[in-house]
């Protein structure tokens, strides 16, 4: 019975090929400062007013330097994290819907039950750019916790 032995050059070649593949994967990492989902360099924050689960969610839009984005329309879609529930939709609102132009979008939103939710914030900028971002929330009788 013959024993198969890898020739030295073949083993060295395979090793170098593996190193090259790993180097290419490592060098191909995305720059975290540049969004890769088509979203402009904006910061989207979702919050809920303190206290019991209310009828409003707050979305703050700023640019990468912290300046308020005041010329967008922002809408919401809420889904329970389990199947079988109808989504809760909130029509898009402008920044001045609450009487202030400050980058804080107050959006009427009524949770239909307690539990874990995924809320999708949809933004339509004045230049026609659109994007969305998902947020995980937990709704209890006492509060809405944005994770």
Image (cartoon, helix red, strand yellow):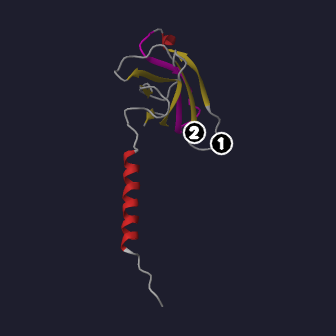
Q: Residue at label 1?
A: 84
Residue 122 in sight here:
no
Along the line of sight, which residue is nearer the eye, 137 or 110?
137
Q: Residue at label 2?
A: 80
Whether residue 115 is in magenta: the answer is: yes
Along the line of sight, which residue is nearer the eye, 119 or 115?
119
Q: Residue at the location (52% across, 29% down)?
A: 132
Residue furthest top in the image: 99
Along the line of sight, which residue is nearer the eye, 32 or 26?
26
Find the distance from the CA under tag 2 to the CA under tag 1.
9 Å
Along the line of sight, which residue is nearer the eye, 126 or 113?
126
Residue 95 in sight here:
yes
Whether residue 113 is in magenta: the answer is: yes
Residue furthest front in the image: 9
Q: Quadrant of residue 89?
A: top right
Element type where label 1 sits in the image = loop
State if disc 1 and disc 2 touch (CB < 8 Å).
yes
């Amino acid at each position: 019975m013959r024993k198969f032995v890898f020739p030295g050059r073949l083993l060295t070649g395979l090793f170098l090929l593996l190193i090259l593949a790993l180097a290419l994967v490592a060098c191909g990492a995305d720059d975290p400062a540049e969004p890769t989902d088509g979203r402009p360099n904006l910061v989207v924050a979702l919050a809920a007013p303190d206290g019991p689960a209310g009828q409003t969610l707050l979305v703050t839009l700023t640019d990468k330097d912290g300046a308020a984005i005041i010329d967008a329309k922002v809408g919401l879609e809420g889904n329970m994290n389990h199947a079988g529930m109808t989504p809760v939709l909130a029509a898009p609102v402008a920044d001045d819907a609450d009487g202030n132009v400050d980058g804080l979008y107050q959006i009427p939103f009524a949770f239909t039950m307690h539990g874990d939710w995924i809320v999708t914030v949809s933004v339509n900028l004045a230049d026609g750019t659109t994007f969305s971002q998902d947020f995980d929330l937990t709704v209890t009788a006492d509060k809405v916790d944005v994770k």
